[in-house]
Amino acid sequence: MARSTTDPQHAELTKVLESMLERDEEITARAVTRQHSSLKNASDITRHEGRRTILNAFQSKQAELRKFAGRVRNKGTTIVAKSLQAADERIQELETNEQARIASHLAMITAVAELGGTQKLQKFYKDYAHIRDQLVRQGALPAQFSQS
């Protein structure tokens, strides 16, 4: 019969692992047991499926973080700064494109409405409420179509 655990949610284990991750301390079962109040042996973690799963997840996170940090160190701050600048420029370009699309969408709707197609547009936006709601959030829809 399996023993019941005093911390079934593994809150302390998670807290210990998070602090080790923040300090970039090597995450091993033995290292965790040195900091945990009730787990005294590495096998207390490795032989318990739930604890082992949590440990493995944090080890994977640490490996990913270290891989990313290594890339930053290898590339150097100048290259990272250049790639950040390029990313900022791309974001600016995408935001400009979005503004242009919104403006053209508004112009198209206004033109159709002026030609007498208001009822057809309202019917369309009634049938496609999720699209209408998204366009309203983006400011790409005249007020007369925003509530149907």
Image: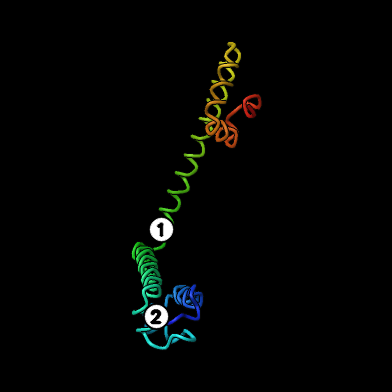
Residue 42 lies in what quarter of the image?
A: bottom left
- Quarter of the image with the C terminus is top right
> How far across and how far down the image is residue 32, in percent?
42, 82
Secondary structure type for disc 1: helix
> How far across and how far down the image is residue 3, in percent?
42, 82
Secondary structure type for disc 2: loop
Q: Nearer the viewer, residue 101 or 96?
A: 101
What residue sits 49% from the left and 86% below the top? 37
Mark 1 and mark 2: Cα distance apart in space: 51 Å
CB atoms of marks 1 and 2 within 8 Å: no
Label for residue 135? Answer: none
Q: Between tags 1 and 2, which lies in front?
A: 2
- Quarter of the image with the N terminus is bottom left
Judging by the rendered image, the residue that carries numbered circle 1 is 80
Q: Amino acid at mark 1?
A: Val
Q: Is residue 108 above or below residue 36?
A: above
